[in-house]
Amino acid sequence: MAEWVRVAAVAGCPVGQLTSVAAGGEQIVLANVDGDVYALLDQCSHEEYPLSDGDLEGTDLVCMYHGARFDACTGKNKGLPAIRPVRSFPVDIRDGDVYVEV
Ligand code: FES
């Protein structure tokens, strides 16, 4: 059953950067896109390397290993070699903290 888990302070997720956190037995990457925080599974759908090792370019999360691109807001795959999306998680901000539903 899904539950909301506090994973970080908003201040710990700088704009334009990726932050890796653990919640509910999952490794999750937080992406701060222009002040809005999004959460994706921290595992590339290509060869399962951590997406948090990559870069955030606007709304694109770029995997550093082979260059796959994903929409950081939805997890949708946008560029090869990834041909599948990455799971995304609902995010809520409460009193300066980031909560993810896992
Ligand atoms: S593991 Fe991400 S592009 Fe290959």
Image (cartoon, rainbow, N blue to C red):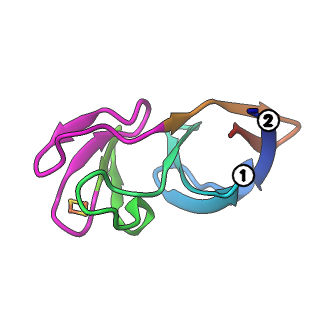
Q: Is residue 57 left or right of residue 74?
A: left
Q: Is residue 16 magenta?
A: no
Determine which of the numbered discs, if any, sits on residue 73 in the image: none
The image quadrant that residue 91 belongs to is top right
Residue 57 visible in rendering = yes
What residue do we see at 33% from left, 62% from top? Answer: 48
Q: Amino acid at mark 2?
A: Glu
Q: Are marks 1 and 2 in contact (CB under 8 Å)?
A: yes
Q: Residue furthest front?
A: 1
- In the picture, measured across the screen, residue 96 lies left or right of residue 71, that is right
Give how far across and how far down residue 11 sits, in percent.
73, 54
Q: Residues within 10 Å of mark 1 (few under 14, many from 20)?
A: some
| Residue at position x 63%, y 55% in the image | 13
Residue at image position (18%, 48%) is 82
* Residue neighbourhood size for the residue with mark 2, other residues' Cα within 10 Å, grouped as few (<14), some (14–19), many (≥20): few
Q: Please provide the residue range marked out in magenta.
A: 63-87
Front-lying residue, 75 or 62: 75
Q: Which residue is mark 2?
A: 3
Q: Secondary structure at mark 2?
A: loop
Amino acid type of disc 1?
A: Gly
Image quadrant in which the N terminus is located:
top right
Q: Earlier in the sequence, mark 1 or mark 2?
A: 2
Q: Position of residue 56 (x, y in %)?
A: 36, 52
Is residue 97 in view? no
Q: What residue is disc 1 on?
A: 24
Drawn side of residue 81 relative to residue 73, left or right: left
**Residue 58: x and y, percent?**
33, 41
Q: Quadrant of ligand 1?
A: bottom left
User: Is residue 66 part of the magenta span, yes or no?
Assistant: yes
